[in-house]
Amino acid sequence: MSGAPVVDADYLKEIERARRDLRALIYSKQCAPIMLRVAWHDAGTYDAKTKTGGPNGSIRNEEEYKRDENKGLEKAIEFCEEVKAKHPKITYADLYQLAGVVAVEVTGGPIIDFVPGRKDSSVSPNKGLLPDATKGVQHLKDIFYRMGLSDKDIVALSGGHTLGKAHNERSGFDGPWTKDPMKFDNTYFKELLKDTSNGLLKLPTDKALMEDPTFLGYVKLYADDEETFFKDYAASHKKLSELGFTPSVPPSKFAGVNTTLLALGAVAVIVAAAVVLLCYFYHPR
Ligand code: HEM
């Protein structure tokens, strides 16, 4: 598919069915971390200046998923293929982002608003657009600013490392960031602030979050206040999942709310006018 999908009632129904299938699949395969990572790696190639890359499903191309930076993600692509076979109407771009949203939700993380309608692209972006874990503060800023994201987004999204682990054979790094890598919470930030590592992983890019004063402010905030982390994470994840994507129709639920509010407003005005008239005509003289 090359054009944007038509997001009509049928497409929305299909998205809800796929969401249910993804919940079951992620539970039975215990694959939330890799599903989150595939969504991030499909989206994280976006270039805000050239408007290329981003969440467009291109990671399904063998040429892209076989790259070193994507090692291990083939598994997630295979899992998503099971859902795609049942819901062929849904674009890969939507499916991968939905998988990321569901992975966070089913591991206890925040609910992330999901708006469907992304186009698929068969063109893969250049290599080397995703962050390199061996680098530091300036590199993180260069990569995320290129996507159009902020310092706050960098720290909130790094909290995705609350899930899963590194695998020596994939990245050269090893081990989880937290003691409970299947639970989405704020312990990534709590562990980051501890002096001892307790055998847990800290990538150079994780440590970089302690080296920049703006980053550090957010690390401390999120370690102290899980509610704020969840709120900011959900907003940053939504931004990441919508890089370069403008929904073709306003999300129906908002449209629904607006129509309902207008209708209620109109009823309220009519009732008020009727009360005023009644008082005027039936006022005891
Ligand atoms: C900030 C820059 C980032 C760098 C340098 C980075 C780097 C890495 C590396 C090296 C791994 C280990 C891969 C392996 O060996 O299997 C990894 C895993 C992971 N990353 Fe990141 N990452 C970054 C940001 C993110 C973001 C923004 C998210 C999601 C919001 C994310 C989600 C994950 C998850 C869930 C895993 C675990 C995958 C698994 O268990 O198979 N990462 N990351």
Image: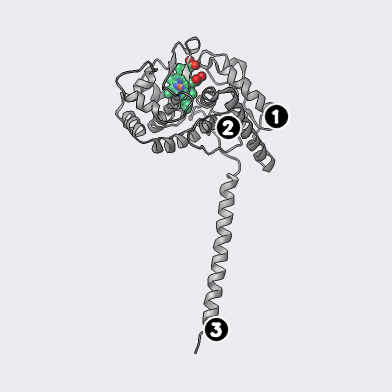
Residue behind mark 1 = 86
Q: Quadrant of residue 2?
A: top right
| CB contact under 8 Å: marks 3 and 1 | no
Q: Tell me, for residue 281, which label it has, or none.
A: 3
Q: Residue at x 45, y 10 (%)?
A: 172
Looking at the rendered image, the quarter that the N terminus falls into is top right
Q: Earlier in the sequence, mark 3 or mark 2?
A: 2
Foreground tag (3 vs 1): 1
Q: Is residue 16 left or right of residue 277?
A: right
Q: Quadrant of residue 200?
A: top left
Q: Secondary structure at mark 2?
A: helix
Q: Quadrant of residue 20?
A: top right
Quick one: 260 or 250, which is closer to the camera?
Answer: 260
Q: Secondary structure at mark 3?
A: helix
Q: Secondary structure at mark 1?
A: helix
Please, what is the three-letter code of the amino acid marked with disc 1?
A: Lys
Residue 86 percent location from the top left of the image:
70, 29
Q: Earlier in the sequence, mark 3 or mark 1?
A: 1
Quick one: 4 or 161, which is closer to the camera?
Answer: 161
Q: CA distance from mark 3 to mark 1?
A: 65 Å
Q: Residue at x 57, y 29 (%)?
A: 99
